[in-house]
Image: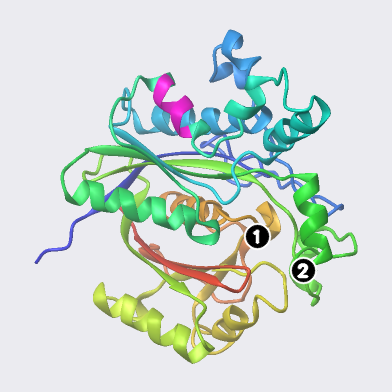
Amino acid sequence: MKRMNYYINGIGIISPQRTFNNDEFLSEVAQYDDNHLNCVTPEFKEYINPIQLRRLSRMLRAGLSAAVISVRDSKINAPDGIITGTGYGFLTDTGKFLTEIYDYKEKQLTPTFFMQSTYNALAGLVALTFKCKGYNNTYVNKGFAFETSLHDAMMQLEKKASQTLLVGGYDERDDAQYRIHLRSLYYKTKPINNLHLFEHKTVGTLQGEAAAFFAVSDEASDQTWCRLVDLKMTFLPESKESLFINLTRFLSANGVSVNDIDFFVNGMSGDVKNDALLESLAQDELKNIAEVRFKHLCGEYCTASSFGLWLAASILKKQQIPAIVRFNQINAQSPIKTVLIINQYMGRNYSFVLLKSAH
């Protein structure tokens, strides 16, 4: 049976780098020295009604703006459905709501904090903005949240249930979460510069955040960034050999071999413990392939793979690899046609995403 084609026809992302302008591509790189990477935000009133804007929290503004940028980029009026993925949702408003419960003894609570803290708040807001009455779903499964959203979109398109789906991934940086994870050594204990993340061979990573949306369709258009071939999720591989076997099977099922990959996007987080399998894979089985990394630019969060997808799609469309993301001396063949994304989250959730150029 012929495999279905999936195309990314529009992208909008707001991250710790200046990524909201699709005409620019990492021409200016933001640096951070405190292990927290906050979103670089645009002028929100260019994407959101000013009256509505003042009622929204910071990350809801970022998420809605990313969705609007993606829809405008795809040149469609509105998506047929909306699918989002998040690891923790909107933690700041959740904290405010819980604090009010305690301070006011569960009386006279502000409903806004509760409404804006739910996991599906962004998907509902985007649907209301575009008057989208179609399929609407949100996945909350930590390190697989964004990948599951993408997989759902692929299934919906395969059933011909929709023509264009808006697929998003978002997570918010939060001080309380940082302190909790710091105690378990998930974040680095000493401040470092984010651009030197991979030079520090220590336990822990950097805390990041972002909101990204992709207009995914079963038909290409003049705005198409790339073709989404397939994806696969793997939980807790036993060893590097086991991970590589899963990878080769994934590639083989799509008629591709390791030698066909022009470059791969490595989702290492700068944590020597959680990065062990991917680092070993990069040094051995994938050592002859051009390597790109991205978490020194956006930090680590549950849906960081969405930043990796934006980076890979941008390279495929613009046919250039910025120097800031190159991590070996191997040059990708030109034109760049086939890209593999390998991501890991906390050493548990591993995913493969295969992309090809649109033409």
Spatial separation of the CA atoms under disc 1 and disc 2: 12 Å
- Can residue 36 be seen here? The reply is yes
Task: Locate residue 86 relative to residue 219 in the image: left or right.
Answer: right
SS of the residue at dot 2?
loop
Foreground: 320 or 243?
A: 243
Residue positioned 49% across, 78% down in the render? 289
SS of the residue at dot 1?
helix
- Amino acid type of the residue tagged 2 in the rendering: Gly
Residue positioned 28% across, 52% down in the render? 154
Q: Which mark is residue 204?
A: 2
Q: Return the x and y of residue 206 as percentages of the image width and height.
A: 75, 59
Q: Return the x and y of residue 273 as percentages of the image width and height.
A: 71, 79
- Amino acid type of the residue tagged 1 in the rendering: Lys
- Residue that sits furthest to the left in the current view: 1
Residue that numbered label 1 is attached to = 295
Foreground label between 1 and 2 = 2
Residue positioned 71% across, 45% down in the render? 173
- Position above or below: 350 against 92: below
Residue positioned 78% across, 74% down in the render? 203
* Quarter of the rendering containing residue 345: bottom right
Q: Which mark is residue 338?
A: none
- Of mark 1 and mark 2, the one earlier in the sequence is 2
Span highlighted in magenta in the image:
123-128
Q: Return the x and y of residue 229 as percentages of the image width and height.
A: 30, 61
Circles 1, 2 touching at the beta carbon (< 8 Å): no
